[in-house]
Structure formats: structure tokens, C-alpha cells
Amino acid sequence: MSDQSPASLPSFRSPPLVEVALGFFLADPTEFSYAHVGKFWSTLEPEFPTVRDVDPVSMSVEDSDGAPVSPTEVPLFPRIWMMDRDEQYLVQIQRNAFFLNWRPGKENAAYPRFPAVFHRFNDLRRRYARFMADAASPLGRTEQLELTYINHIPEESISGSEGLAWAVLDDLRPPTRKRWLNRPDRLALATSFRLPDDAGRLYIRAQTAIGRRTRANLVSLTLTAKANVSDVQDSDIVRRWYETAHSWIVRGFEDVTTRMAREAWGEERQVDG
């Protein structure tokens, strides 16, 4: 599984990043129950004092031949949220999934960089696997690993007379001929790219939107890497895949955004990625 050296990856002093999520889906649901919720939360409560249940989510399985795949059935058991005090880190557990999310939280914290977030995820993943092996049954075969970066780019952050989406997204070129239709006032794009060595795919979605709190125009740019990785218990396999996924997400973000936008975010090169 190939990867880029972290030293060669772009970095940004003020990235428009609002959320990072990394985790895995299992091929078969676990026996995770409300009793297990209480027991496992008791081991995490000093770090994650807030717990609540929300609706479960389905999984769109990554298919190697590129054919569209319908989402899997949603488990009847709810999804459990465990949040830290600053609402920066969120553990999500449902019977067929385990995820860790990072968000700026109450203090609008700066992104701590991928190595720190991955280290936290890896520690929690191992603790969850040990707990399930002792309390219920060992985690079975992994169906899919995922890594997602969500960026919200507000209109006021990018100066440009061409419109927000055209100022941000490099693949949007001015028309080479006179056209009847002017530029659309809304935009939704979706693309996918194969990762090297059959390591899955990178999905990129961009769309214009309105900020929930600010009600201001923004571009939502989401990059998600997915792969069928069968053994989540093998730490080396998990680490190498996430390094590849992170490298492609960061380089993909650089590739699809304009130089003007990247300069506004303070693009630089940083050894720790």
C-alpha cells in the first residue's frame, strides 16, 4: 500500500475544516446492548462525560468494480454518542460500527492535526475491541474503513468577483464560448477516484449551501476515503490504510481548490502532515 511522505504533504494555518471522522463498519452486527453501553461508558466517563442515543446510520459499501451499491440495512439498536466536555471529540458506536469524530467544539479549537486524532482513535478502537472480547464477543470481520474531512468555506473568507464556488474550486473553468445560460446560482458536484494498490476510493463532494447558524453562503467540500479492509484488529494494516487515506485527502483537497483560496487558508508544508 503506497503512501506519500508526510513531509511532502500540504498544510494550512487556517484550514476551513469543521469535522473529521474516522472509523469502521463491521460485516456482522455485534451483541452490543444497553447493558454494554453502561459498562463501556463507565470506562470512558472521565474523558467522555456526556452520553446519549441517536438514530443509527446505514453504510454504503465500497465496491471494488465501481458499481453502485445500495446502503446496508440499518441496525434496530440506536447509535450511541459519547462526547467530551469541550464537545471536540465524539465517540459513535452502533452494533455494526465504531467511529471517532473531531470538531472545533465549544471553544472553536484549532485542528490538532491528523496524527493526534488518529492516535486517539487507535487507542479507543483497541479499548472497544478488548471490551467487546471480554464482555460479549470479539469483533468480527470488518466490512469497511472510512476517513472523512468536512470543510465549510464561507463567502466572506474568499475574495473574488467570480462567485464563491468559482473562487474556491479549481475544476470550474470559465466557459470558452458564449452560452445562453449564465453561471448557476447553486452547485452540486460528486466525483470519485481509485486509491493506489486497490486501497479503496476517494469520494469528493462539493455543493453550495447556507450556514446553519450564520445563514451565510458557503461551499461545503467533503472528502471521504473508503476501503474494504477485513481485519481491523491488525494495527499495522489499519495504520497504513489511514496514512494512505489521509495523504490522498490532503492532496486531493489541494488539487481541487484554487491557489487564491489556498493562500487565504495559509498553505504551507509541514513535516507532521
Image (cartoon, grey):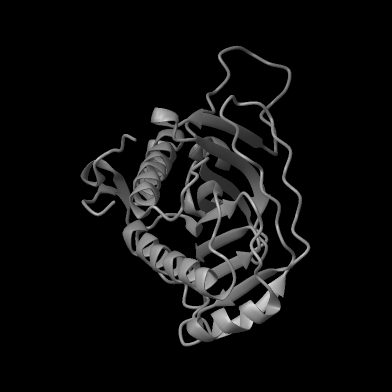
Q: Position of residue 70 (x, y in %)?
A: 74, 38
| In this picture, residue 74 sits left or right of residue 242 | right
Is residue 111 shown to the viewer in this render?
A: no
Of residue 52 and residue 122, the one placed in the foreground of this image is 122
29 over 249 or under it: above or below: below
Write the residue at 69% across / 34% down.
Answer: 69
137 over 154 or under it: above or below: below
Of residue 51 and residue 72, the one placed in the foreground of this image is 72
Q: Position of residue 152 (x, y in %)?
A: 54, 53
Write the residue at 55% across / 14% down.
Answer: 176
Quadrant of image for the N terminus: top left
Single out the residue that lies furthest toward the top: 177
246 over 95 or under it: above or below: above
199 over 103 or under it: above or below: above
Write the residue at 70% across / 39% down.
Answer: 186
Write the residue at 67% across / 81% down.
Answer: 35
| In this picture, residue 133 sits left or right of residue 189 | left
Is residue 93 shown to the viewer in this render?
A: yes
Of residue 162 and residue 153, the one placed in the foreground of this image is 153
Q: Position of residue 40 (x, y in %)?
A: 55, 79
Q: Position of residue 146 (x, y in %)?
A: 52, 49
Single out the residue that lies furthest toward the right: 76
